[in-house]
């Protein structure tokens, strides 16, 4: 192993020069000769029978190239598949047509498409399509959908139940029965709209004759798009090339395979010309997946000393109208297994009900299942602390998995790889000076000020892999990653990865990894991603897996390159391979560094192949297919300090401290950036964001006017720090950081607000903690206190 | 019925015939192929489309192309001059003020506008004045730091930091 120079350095991002000069290539920036524009007519009803569709006027409009309805797709475009078929759950894989034929099931369900010379004409024509709808009864939430006699979203899903999935370890019933203290709480994980800044887009280009399709697409995982598009369209997989160059944020919303890209493909194939579809933001609100939307109950059993002994959780998850690509896995596997968190609770059970409603389908949104788990557990720990009159720090420490217990099999039956939960908590407490902070809180209370301190000690299951786990969970794909490291004749390096970073900076960090090992400057390494025509295979960027899985594949391929370079150097230097050492890209016989060959020399010799040792193939390129043996388990401690104004209900941030342990860190600047952004999204859920449907199934928060994507004034300055506990099962020691902030932060904020309001006797408020909700909770608590003291005053008087 | 307009964009004069309903952002992207200016919403909330019109930052999705007749427009493509980054671009690069980069062109133009109004803003003032530009990736922290760094550089108080400084051609390559 060479001396570390690039690994651990805050190298400036190599993707930035094109992005800060306006030269990025996002999907909507592509313009192809002869390209026409597609728009989608979307249902204004959440649930209705389509009695008739008349497209004649639209078709007759000048500039309109074609109009298609669901009937036109018959035999040409199969329904959109669900790719996470969770086993043992009676999963109902209902048909998800790209355009509705007889029934629309949510506001925004596609009904027809218009293709025209320009988007204006297409929109004008859209208004000329006459659809006769017969409105049907609507269910938008879990309670409505599961009520007896509720209207069915799908006739083949009785009770609107998409699945019922169960998990159990140990004996939760007995543990709860025998517990000295029992707590029960219901939580709402409100529905969120991911709102990646770049709307989704697809440019489909079918080449007649060659019978090939090139699809430019806003995707986190172009190879999955290729796979599912092949299944949906019938185009052979090797005749599809999916390109996702610059992608403007995803946060899970660009994992799924959607009707939009399938319809653009269909239209391009019908017309034999390129077709572009770019959604508008209002369309994004309706037709791109939503996140969360779960109703949860937790029953926690504990001893009076604060030791937690048993846990039972029920999750009613709103799946929306159809099962999106990865949707069934989110409230089940990605949620349930990690609920016990950092704690030694072994007796644990979880029931998950997936429920169909007349709403936009839900799927993975940053953290996907794990923020919900960490929120639930960390709220329960605080409720237990309040119940027992203990400090929340003390309860956490009492229940932490000790540092010497790793690897540790959790109550969720996951094999946690490594951890030291006290260490991150200690550092966070030290950063805020916890003891003195608690004293300040007391003093403030005496002055009538409500300061709250919220803790979140979390562990996540990330680095999504291995493939055999994917198979056991019912994910219809693998979770390995390939890598190619190719050294060109001049010694410049091209790296291919199957992951598809879209803001996470791996064009830089992967170049650091390879540059470090090969001993070449970062500038000499180009990282290629997001093109199925160039990259053999790949499963994509999500689940904090890009660097842990994709990066490890790259390092392993790089080691193979070095091995070959050593053999060739030995041959050229007339020495034995075992006598060759390499140091920062220089290969020499041990003890004779003066007579060294550089990696550039060797690359040229390997590529011209004039003088190779017997049996050595030409070229200097290696491939690695890497499938990890386990997930990774980043962890940490976040502390949020707030002040709540009891008159207005407004929450003001005083401090936000994040201590994370994401294993080894390649680029601290980038890792900090990931943490910042993740925390901002968690704060968004805690305080601001909420997707709301009215009774007839209209999304009344359907634009950025009504839905609060946090702005710069709403996010506090964040203080970040790290401890470093390497991942023991990959050679880089990396655990992954993409979701950390989001998984850690919502409960830190809510715990802080509830802590601030504890003098009112408030134990819980559901997210988002808007001023109105907080104010109402305070007023309700005051009224309850007043009536209680009134009653006790009366009884005292009698 | 199309209307004739004359617009100077990044110092280049353009004479065009446009639909009256064409938005300025659509004109820049579709007619002039200046795709650095992005469309992130349809209600004027996100600010991804912010450009300078006659020296003032405006949201180009809230203005018709015909309203820009006779105007001087500057987009992200016009920020760098003579192969040298604008201090705002340099600071965004130096301080990791962007991740996916989609909001970045509008964010930088809006930030240049705010420094024109106030060359020495507090962090709080920067946050307040960038309220109309949304970023979903960064949590704004490094954006605030980048604007401070650019402000200092523009006041002549510090030199740009880091590798590749002052070079509009060095560093990244398209993948």
Image: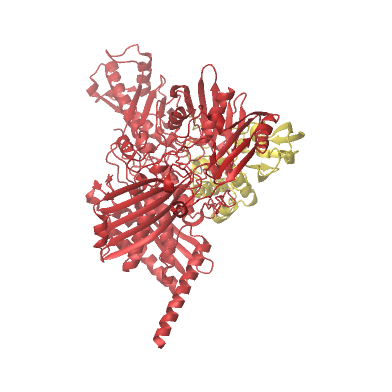
Quarter location, residue A451: bottom left
Figure chain in red: A
User: Residue A145, can we see it?
Assistant: yes
Which coloring applies here? Answer: by chain
Q: In this view, does A422 lie to the left or right of B59?
A: left
Q: Count numbered badges in the picture.
A: 0
| Residue A24 in view | no
Q: In this view, does A327 lie above or below A561?
A: below
Q: Quadrant of residue A663?
A: top left
Closer to the camera, A141 or B9? Answer: A141
The quarter of the image holding the N terminus of chain A is top left
Q: Is residue A649 left or right of residue A55?
A: left
Q: Is residue A452 above or below residue A52?
A: below
Residue A510 image offset from top left, x and y in percent: 40, 34
Q: In which quarter of the image is the C terminus of chain A?
A: bottom left
Q: Which of B5 and A414 is in front in this view?
A: A414
| Residue B163: percent from left, percent from top | 47, 37
Residue found farthest to the top: A610
Chain B colour in the picture: yellow
For the residue pair A703 and A362, the one nearer the viewer reads as: A362
Residue A505, image x, y percentages = 45, 38
Residue at x 36%, y 49% (from the top left corner)? A352
A86 lies left or right of B60: left
Q: Is residue A232 above or below residue B94?
A: above
User: Residue A87's x, y, as percent?
Assistant: 33, 40
């Amino acid at each position: 192993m060479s001396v570390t120079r690039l690994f651990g350095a805050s190298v400036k991002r190599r993707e930035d020069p094109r992005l800060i000069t306006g030269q990025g290539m996002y999907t909507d920036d592509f313009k192809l000769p002869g390209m026409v524009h597609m728009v989608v007519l979307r249902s204004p009803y959440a649930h209705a029978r389509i009695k008739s569709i008349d497209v004649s006027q639209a078709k007759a409009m000048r500039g309109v190239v074609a109009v298609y309805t669901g009937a036109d797709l018959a035999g040409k475009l199969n329904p959109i598949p669900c790719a996470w078929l969770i086993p043992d759950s009676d999963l109902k894989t209902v048909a998800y047509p790209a355009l509705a034929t007889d029934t629309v099931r949510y506001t925004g369900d596609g009904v027809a498409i218009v293709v025209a010379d320009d988007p204006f004409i297409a929109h004008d024509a859209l208004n000329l399509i006459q659809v006769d709808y017969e409105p049907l009864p609507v269910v938008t939430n879990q309670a409505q959908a599961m009520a007896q006699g509720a209207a069915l979203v799908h006739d083949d899903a009785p009770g609107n139940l998409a699945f019922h999935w169960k998990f159990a370890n140990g004996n939760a019933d007995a543990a709860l029965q025998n517990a000295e203290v029992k707590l029960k709480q219901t939580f709402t994980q409100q529905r969120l709209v991911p709102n990646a800044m770049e709307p989704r887009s697809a440019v489909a280009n079918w080449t007649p004759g060659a019978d090939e399709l090139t699809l430019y697409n806003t995707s986190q995982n172009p190879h999955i798009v290729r796979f599912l598009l092949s299944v949906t369209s019938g185009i052979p997989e090797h005749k599809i090339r999916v390109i996702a160059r610059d992608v403007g944020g995803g946060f899970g919303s660009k994992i799924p395979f959607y009707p939009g890209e399938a319809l653009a493909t269909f239209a391009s194939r019908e017309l034999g010309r390129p077709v572009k579809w770019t959604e508008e933001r209002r369309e994004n609100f309706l037709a791109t997946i939503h996140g969360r939307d779960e109703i949860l109950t937790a029953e926690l059993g504990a001893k009076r000393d604060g030791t937690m002994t048993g846990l039972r959780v029920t999750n009613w998850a709103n799946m929306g109208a159809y099962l999106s690509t990865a949707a069934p896995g989110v409230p089940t596997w990605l949620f349930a297994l990690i609920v016990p968190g950092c704690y030694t609770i072994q007796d644990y059970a979880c029931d998950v009900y997936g429920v169909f409603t007349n709403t936009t389908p839900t799927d993975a949104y940053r953290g996907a299942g794990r923020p919900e788990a960490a929120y639930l557990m960390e709220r329960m720990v605080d409720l237990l602390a309040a119940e027992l009159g203990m400090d929340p720090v003390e309860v956490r420490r009492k229940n932490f998995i000790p540092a010497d217990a790793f690897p540790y099999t959790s109550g969720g039956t996951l094999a946690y790889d490594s951890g030291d939960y006290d260490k991150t908590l200690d550092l966070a407490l030290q950063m805020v000076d916890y003891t003195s902070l608690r004293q300040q809180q007391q003093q403030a209370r005496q002055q009538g000020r409500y300061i709250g301190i919220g803790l979140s000690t979390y562990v996540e299951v990330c680095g999504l892999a291995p493939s055999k786990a994917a198979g056991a969970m019912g994910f219809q794909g693998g979770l390995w990653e390939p890598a190619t490291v190719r050294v060109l004749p001049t010694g410049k390096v091209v790296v291919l990865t199957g992951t598809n970073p879209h803001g996470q900076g791996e064009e830089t960090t992967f170049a650091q990894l390879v540059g470090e090992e090969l001993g070449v400057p970062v500038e000499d390494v180009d990282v290629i991603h997001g093109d199925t025509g160039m990259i053999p295979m790949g499963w994509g960027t999500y689940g904090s897996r890009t660097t842990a899985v994709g990066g490890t594949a790259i390092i392993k391929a790089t080691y193979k390159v070095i091995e070959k370079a050593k053999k060739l150097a030995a041959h050229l230097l007339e020495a034995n391979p075992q006598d060759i050492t390499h140091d920062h890209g220089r290969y020499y016989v041990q003890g004779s560094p003066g007579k060294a060959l550089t990696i550039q020399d060797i690359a040229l010799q390997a590529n011209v192949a004039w003088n190779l040792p017997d049996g050595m193939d030409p070229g200097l390129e290696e491939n690695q297919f890497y499938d990890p043996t386990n997930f990774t388990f980043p962890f940490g401690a976040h502390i949020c300090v707030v002040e709540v104004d009891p008159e207005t209900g407004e929450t003001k941030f005083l401090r936000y401290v994040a201590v994370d342990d994401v294993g080894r860190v390649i680029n601290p600047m980038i890792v900090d950036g990931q943490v910042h952004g993740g925390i901002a999204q968690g704060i968004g859920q805690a305080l601001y964001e909420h997707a709301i449907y009215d009774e007839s199934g209209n999304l009344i928060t359907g634009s950025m006017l009504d839905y609060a994507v946090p702005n710069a004034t709403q996010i506090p300055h964040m203080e970040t720090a790290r401890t470093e506990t390497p991942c023991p099962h990959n050679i880089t020691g990396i655990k992954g950081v993409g979701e950390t902030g989001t998984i850690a932060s919502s409960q830190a904020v809510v715990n802080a607000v509830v802590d601030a309001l504890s003098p009112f006797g408030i134990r819980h408020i559901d997210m988002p903690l808007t001023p109105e909700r907080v104010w109402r909770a305070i007023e309700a608590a005051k009224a309850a206190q007043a009536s209680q003291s009134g009653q006790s005053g009366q009884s005292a008087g009698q | 019925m199309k209307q004739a307009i004359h617009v100077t964009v990044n110092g280049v004069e353009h004479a065009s015939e446009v639909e009256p309903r064409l938005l300025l952002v659509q004109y820049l992207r579709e007619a002039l192929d200046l795709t650095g200016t992005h469309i992130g919403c349809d209600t004027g909330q996100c600010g991804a489309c912010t450009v300078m019109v006659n020296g003032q930052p405006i949201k180009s999705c809230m203005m018709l192309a015909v309203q820009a007749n006779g105007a001087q427009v500057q987009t992200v493509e016009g920020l760098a001059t003579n192969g040298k980054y604008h201090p705002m671009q340099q600071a965004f690069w130096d301080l990791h003020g962007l991740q996916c980069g989609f909001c970045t062109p509008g964010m930088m133009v809006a930030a240049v506008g705010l420094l024109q109004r106030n060359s020495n803003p507090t962090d709080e003032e920067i946050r307040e004045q960038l309220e109309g530009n949304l970023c979903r990736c960064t949590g704004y922290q490094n954006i605030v730091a980048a604007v401070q760094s650019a402000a200092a550089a523009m006041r002549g108080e510090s030199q740009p930091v880091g590798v590749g400084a002052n070079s509009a051609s060095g560093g990244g390559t398209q993948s």
